[in-house]
Image (cartoon, rainbow, N blue to C red):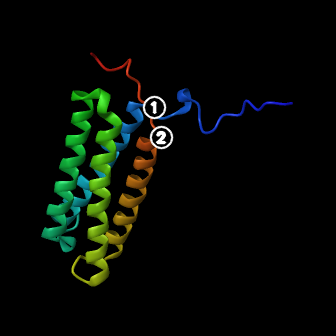
Amino acid sequence: MATSTAQVGPSPAERPSAGSIRTFLLLESATFLSAAAFHFGVFLPGYAHGAAAVAESVIATVLLGGLLATWIRPRAVRGIALAVQGFALLGTFVGLFTIAIGIGPRTVPDLVIHAIMVLELVWGLVVAGRARVNRAEAPS
């Protein structure tokens, strides 16, 4: 009788690390800060939209706070990332909803940046969800 030694899923060494998670949080924060600057009229004055700028600033702040928290609580990197990215994705869907019903800005740049945000956040959530929890990195 033959036995199978095939693994289900990636080995622990192939799973994303805390560094991968932090990289996503930094990239996502930069994306939301750029979007906020865009909506504050920093890049193109004709595209200013105060409500969108404030929402994107709040989301960027939450993502940056999460990034900082991953160094303060290294044992909780995965949970922190899942929480802050989940919040950011929910906020992004609210933004898409406002665009769909005509409240939010309905320009091509807005649609492109929201698509980028959703892709980054979903990818980041997948990375965080698959991350290995390395207790050896964390101080006792």
* In this picture, residue 59 sits left or right of residue 19: left
Count neighbours of disc 2 (C-alpha within 10 A) and say few if under 14, some if 14 to 19, many if 20 or more.
some
Image quadrant holding the C terminus, namely top left
Residue situated in front as seen by the camera: 115 or 138:
138
Picture quadrant of residue 110: bottom left
* In this picture, residue 124 sits left or right of residue 14: left
Q: Are marks 1 and 2 in contact (CB under 8 Å)?
A: no
Query: Vertically, is 110 above or below 13?
Result: below
Q: Which residue is mark 2?
A: 130
The percent coordinates of residue 126 (x first, y second) are: 45, 48
What is the three-letter code of the residue carrying label 2?
Arg
What is the three-letter code of the residue carrying label 1?
Arg
Residue situated in front as seen by the camera: 43 or 127:
127
The percent coordinates of residue 68 (x first, y second) are: 22, 35
Q: Helix or strand or loop: what does disc 2 sit on?
A: helix
Query: Vertically, is 72 above or below 93?
Result: above
Question: Cα distance, mark 1 to mark 2?
Answer: 7 Å
Picture quadrant of residue 93: bottom left
Q: Residue furthest front?
A: 1
Which residue corresponds to the image point at 51% horizontal and 34% vertical from the top-left?
A: 15
* In this picture, residue 61 sits left or right of residue 11: left
Q: Residue furthest bottom?
A: 102
Q: Helix or strand or loop: what does disc 1 sit on?
A: loop
Q: Which residue is mark 1?
A: 132
Q: Residue furthest right?
A: 1
The percent coordinates of residue 103 (x first, y second) are: 21, 81
Residue situated in front as seen by the camera: 37 or 114:
114
Which residue corresponds to the image point at 63% horizontal and 38% vertical from the top-left?
A: 8
Which residue corresponds to the image point at 31% horizontal and 50% vertical from the top-left?
A: 85
The percent coordinates of residue 14 (x first, y second) are: 55, 31
- Residue 140, labelled with which disc? none
